[in-house]
Image: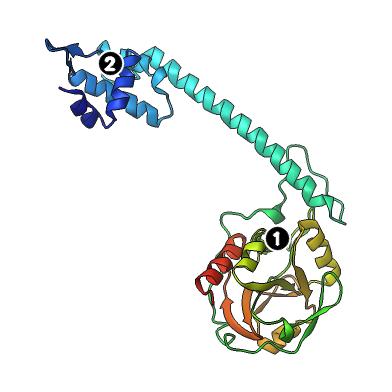
Amino acid sequence: MRISELARRAGVTVKAVRYYESLGLLAPDRLANGYRDYGEGDVRLAREIRALGRLGIPVERTRPFLDCLVVGHQHADDCPASLAEYREAIDEITRRIDGLTARRTALVTHLHEAAHRNSRVPPAGRAEGEDPMTDYLSLPADLPVPEDDGATAHLPGTEMPHLELRATGGGTVRLDALGTGRTVLYVYPLTGRPGTDLPEGWNAIPGARGCTPEACGFRDHHQELLAADAAGVYGLSSQDTAYQEEVVERLRLPFRMLSDPTHDLTRALGLPTFDSAGPTLYKRLTLIVRDGVIEHVFYPVFPPDEHAGQVLDWLRANAR
C-alpha cells in the first residue's frame, strides 16, 4: 500500500510515517519503480507507535515494543524490554511530579509569606510537612452550592437607603450617594485571617466559604471593572472597620470596605442573613447600583472565587 493509505489506516500523518522511517522503526519494501510498499505489519507498528504516544512514550523510545511485535508476540508489551521501558517512563513522570511538587511548595511558601507581610496578625506556626497554603485562600472542591430562595427578588428597582457606613481608609460612605453611573457593592459574610480557624461547620453552610478568594477576585479584576463602566467597587460585611482595615492592607485591595455591624442595611432593604455559631452574618450577594437605584442583583453567588469575573461579564454585556 502507499504511504497515504498507511497514514490513514494508522491514524497518523504522512509526515509522521516518514519520521518513523527515518528512525528505522518502519522498513517498507521497495517496488521496481522505487515507490515504498507498506504491508499490514507496518500498519500495526504505526498504530502501536501512536498508542504509545498517547501514554506519553515518545516515538524515539518505542523500539522495544515494536521489536516485540516483529518477533511474533501478540502484544507489544509481552517482552521484558517493553516492561523496562514502562518502568523508565513511570520513573521519569515521577521525577517530573517531584519537581513540580517542589515548585508548588516554594510558590505557596512565598504566597504564605506575602499574605502575612502586611498583616497586623502574626502568622500561626505550621506543623512540619503541613501545606503552607492556609484554608482562607483555597476552596474545597465539595462545597455545597447555595440555592436561590427568592430572598432578593424584591430588590431590583429599589432605591438605596439613606445610610452612612464607616469605611476603610477613614470616613464614611453614604449608600444613597454613591455617585452617578454604576457601582458594584458586593456583600459577604466574613473574611478569615491567616492562622485563624474559620467558624465551626463553616464549609457546610451553603455560600459561606470563600470571602477572601472573592475579595482577591475583585482586586485582580478591579481595573477591568472600571474599564467596563463601573464607577466604583465596594465590599460590605458586618465585621468592624479595624478588622476590615487589616484585610485591605494584607490583600492590597484597591477599593474600600464598608462596615455594617448592626445590620442596618438588612433592616432597610431586607437583605438575607444567616446565623453561624452566634453572630448574624450577611449572605453573599452583589448589588449593581445605578444612579442610586438597584439595577441588578447577583444572588446566590457561586463559586465566590469566580464571581468578580461574572460581574465583569455582566457589565460588558449590559454596557450603556
Q: How far apart are the alpha carbons under marks 1 and 2? A: 58 Å
Residue 178 position, x and y percent, is 72, 81
Q: Quadrant of the N terminus?
A: top left
Is residue 76 visible in the rendered image? The answer is no
Residue at the extreme left of the image, as rendered: 32
Is residue 60 toward the left or the right of residue 6 in the image?
right
On the image, numbered disc 1 is attached to which residue?
Answer: 212
Q: Counting residues from the N terminus, which is met first, the one under dot 1 or under dot 2? A: 2
- Horizontal and vertical percent position of residue 287: 63, 77
Picture coordinates of residue 224 (x, y %)? 62, 63
Residue drawn where x is 33% and y is 28% of the image: 50
Q: Could you tell me which secondary element the residue under label 1 belongs to?
A: helix
6, above or below 273, in the image: above
* Residue 315 numbered mark, or none: none
Residue placed at 78% from the left, 48% from the top? 114
Q: Which mark is residue 26?
A: 2
Q: Which amino acid, mark 1? A: Thr
Neighbor class of circle 2 (other Cα within 10 Å; few <14, some 14-19, many 20+) is some
Left or right? Give the position of 26 relative to 216: left
